[in-house]
Image (cartoon, rainbow, N blue to C red):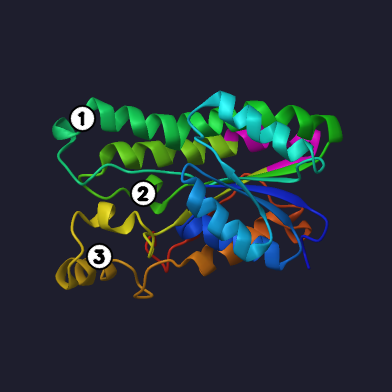
Amino acid sequence: MRLKGKIAIVTGAGSGFGAGIARRFAAEGARVFVADINGDAARDVAREIGGVAVACNVAQRVEIEALRDRVAELGPLDILVNNAGVTHLPAATEEVSEADFDRIVSINMKAIFHATQVFVPGFKQRQSGVILNIASTAGVSPRPRLSWYNASKGWVITATKALAVELAPHGIRVNALNPVAGETPLLKSFMGEDTPEVRAKFLSTIPLGRFSTPEDMGNAALFLCSDEASMVTGVAMEVDGGRCI
């Protein structure tokens, strides 16, 4: 029960890594707000873990503010996990559409900007709080033909470190996780196509020989968001089976 009595938000928690993090937090005693653009998926996960479902488009500031107000009905927020993210299909950089680029900026980057500005004032007032951003190994060791996705995750890592330095005097910790691709709805998008041959080629770049799982991410997120990591801030922890070595 390492998060007993804590209130947490996990965005993009209706599936994949976000759902894994939400499940782990709930198992450790947290009251979890399961936020997802897919309201039905959010409700399914929330029902499973005894959490609170919120249909939320994180790219819209007004919806982040509504999420803040919903959380305030139960108490002050302790943990914010910015997990929601998208990619573009593998393509030569000149072939990526402006619409795909704008979508990546809105969800992978601007959503973190909105959430930080909306929730940090409350954290500062209480002189405590934890922010966990889900970045990617793509921000450390970029894969070809995913240039703008790679760039967005590099931005997340830099933003995490910058915020960690700025917010530390206020008792706020900011960290990131860098997963390798996992068994999530985004996997096919990363690979371009999901065939045994493509999977084998992808897995050959991961020394431990498997994808990241929602459980892997949940365990790592639990540590970084718990009091056990009270001296850890500004870290971008790789959960990647050795991919970035």
Q: Nearer the viewer, residue 225 or 66?
A: 66
**Residue at the spot 18% in from the left edge and 35% down from the top edge:** 93
The amino acid marked with disc number 1 is Ser
The amino acid marked with disc number 2 is Ala
- Is residue 167 found inside the magenta-colored segment of the image? yes
Q: In which quadrant of the rendered image does the N terminus lie?
A: bottom right
Q: How crowded is mark 3: few (under 14 residues within 10 Å), some or many (20 or more)?
A: some
**Residue at the spot 39% in from the left edge and 37% down from the top edge:** 152
Where's residue 231, x and y in %? 75, 52
State the mark number for residue 138: 2
Using the rendered image of the protein, determine whether residue 117 is visible from the camera's viewpoint.
Answer: yes
Residue 1 vs residue 190: left or right?
right
| 3D distance between C-alphas at marks 2 and 1 | 20 Å
Q: In which quadrant of the rendered image does the C terminus lie?
A: bottom left
Where's residue 155, x and y in %? 45, 35
Mark 2 secondary-structure assignment: helix
Answer with mark 1 or mark 3, whichever residue precedes in sequence. Answer: 1
Answer with mark 2 or mark 1, whichever residue precedes in sequence. Answer: 1
Q: Mark 3 points at which residue?
A: 202
Residue 29 vs 57, above or below: the answer is: below
**Residue at the spot 77% in from the left edge and 60% down from the top edge:** 3
Using the rendered image of the protein, determine whether residue 177 is visible from the camera's viewpoint.
Answer: no
Residue 163 vs 81, above or below: the answer is: above
Residue 97 vs residue 172: left or right?
left
Residue 135 vs residue 208: left or right?
right
Hey, which residue is sitting farthest right in the picture?
126
State the mark number for residue 97: 1
Magenta-drawn segment: 162-173
| 3D distance between C-alphas at marks 3 and 2 | 13 Å
